[in-house]
Amino acid sequence: MFVSHTGLTALLACCLLLSACNSKPYAEHPIKPIRLVDSVHERWQQSHRNFIGFPSPQAFSVCHDLSCHSVTNLSLDDDEWARVKRLFSPKAAYAESERQQIQQAIAFLEQIVGSKTGTSHDLAKNQLIGSRQGQLDCIDEATNTTVYLRMIESEGLLQWHQTAPRTSRGLLIGRAPHNTATMIDTQSSVRYAVDAWYFDNGKPPAIVTLDSWKQGWRPE
């Protein structure tokens, strides 16, 4: 992921906050962009003040241009959202099948959003094409994937999973920091990382157990 050295301390604090336990279900908490030290100034405050914390197909926010440098508010039309819903029909008979549906839905949402925000050419990891414009790092990916998961959950499309807070790895063990969206299998209580950062825009994200992800999982 892309992050300045001056931002590590703030990012660590934020990650701990995101991982903290709370009595409220995660779906009742607004989604907020992750702050970095070098982004804390009035312009950042103004541009991120209206980030939609409770996304719906009719109104949601996404981050882009690395570390949520830019935020765009969007909506899906009826046909776009109907196509998302069709990916969950018929209802999955097993949690594993629903995870495959989730992968397809997030890939499709990335494609739609990419065409609306100019991020359709976002490359895997932190590859850049000349500038940060239109590119996503793991902070952007973790936030946007959480937005998509929350939309899917709030519209009643999930029966085997529920969304969970973003989390990170690396900071406490000397590795490069990395962020991911997460969700929980409600039957087994196993928490999964949903990580789109390793792939180009519009490709299905990886869904792996959070324990494996925390230990340094990466695609082979």
Image (tube, helix red, strand yellow):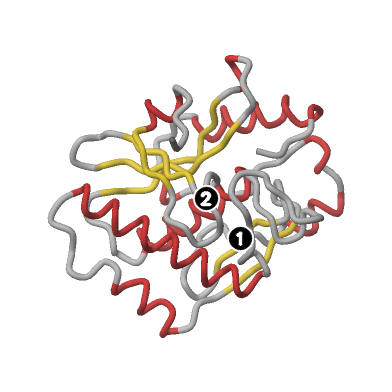
Locate residue 186 relative to residue 102 in the image: left or right: left
Residue 24 horizontal/vertical position (percent):
40, 41
At horizontal 43% and vertical 60% (from top left) the residue drawn is 106
- Residue 31 position in % (x across, y down): 55, 51
Q: Tag 2 or tag 1, which sits nearer the N-term?
A: 1
In the image: residue 86, left or right of residue 39: left
**Residue holding disc 1:** 62
Res 191 quadrant in image: top left
Give the vertical position of 183 relative to 86 (above or below).
above
Label for residue 35?
none
Q: Give the residue displayed 43% in from the left and 30% down from the top.
A: 213
How many residues crowd mark 2 within 10 Å: few (<14), some (14–19), many (20+)?
Answer: some
How many numbered discs sit on the rendered protein? 2
Q: From the image, which quarter does the C terminus lie in?
A: top left
Q: Is residue 25 visible?
A: no
**Residue 216 image position (x, y, % from top left):** 48, 25
Kind of residue indicated by mark 1: Val
Q: Residues within 10 Å of mark 1 (few under 14, many from 20)?
A: many
Quadrant for residue 35, please give it: top right
SS class, disc 2: loop
Q: Alpha-carbon distance for marks 1 and 2?
A: 17 Å
| Amino acid found under the numbered disc labelled 2 | Phe
Q: Residue furthest right?
A: 42
Residue most extreme to the left: 93
Residue for point 72% across, 27% down: 8
